Amino acid sequence: MKLKFTIVIGCLTLAVILAQRTPAPSNSPGPEFTNDDQLVLPANYREWVFLSSGLGMTYGPVADANRERGPMFDNVFVNPASYQSFLQSGKWPDRTMFVLEVRSSISKGSINNGGHYQGDVVAIESEVKDTAKFPGSGWAFYAFGQAKTGKLFPKTAACYTCHAEKGAADNTFAQFYPTLLKVAKEKGTLNPAYVAASAADGH
């Protein structure tokens, strides 16, 4: 009996030690800002939930400044807590933060001679939802370039109206995130304008 008790205590101790050594799931309470209202780029954003990657879909100033590079990859990440909330409701909660990572594409290298794979980071942008900071829609866009802090896009930037009018769900292009588009359909949270446009296109 004493031996069994010792083994149990030993197993519990080992479990506690392993739990302490196991990294906690990467998470973020949401966007954080500097004293001069720049958005801080989370150091671990690549450990967030990866939503999708597109090739040749880059638009706006980044695309204009890098046309000689050819098609680029757009990788989209979102903080895990907001992702879990979207799965439950089909809407993004307050303090959601997306990171758009733009990388160059390479077509020839090593054993690859036909496809495209990702190269260096060209620029980083972000979309955040903070209703206290941004009354109205609650959404705002930031450009990092390759810096650690991002500057706010002016309200006259095309991204504001484009996302609001053409985003499939809650100001975001969920139509390019297959798993999330399904959630928005199931929860009935699709943007009516997107639904109408899709019907007109026969989709």
Image: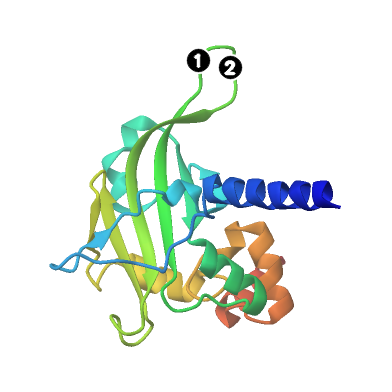
Q: How many marks?
A: 2
In percent of width and height, residue 47 lies at 49, 48
Q: For the view shown, which residue lies furthest in the front direction?
A: 2
Residue nearer the viewer, 139 or 193: 139
* Three-letter amino acid code at the position of disc 2: Asn
Q: Could you say where residue 131 lies in the image, as x and y percent from the top left?
A: 36, 83
The answer to whether marks 2 and 1 mark residues whose Cβ atoms lie closer than 8 Å is yes
What label sits on residue 159 in the rendered view?
A: none
Residue at the disc numbered 2: 112
The residue drawn where x is 50% and y is 15% is: 109
Q: Amino acid at mark 1?
A: Gly
Question: Where does the image place residue 18, in percent across and percent down from the top left?
Answer: 60, 45
Residue 11 as seen in the image, left or right of residue 83: right
Q: Is residue 171 visible?
A: yes
Q: Secondary structure at mark 2?
A: loop
Residue that numbered label 1 is attached to: 109
| 109 shown above or below 57 | above
Residue occupying the point 64% across, 64% down: 180
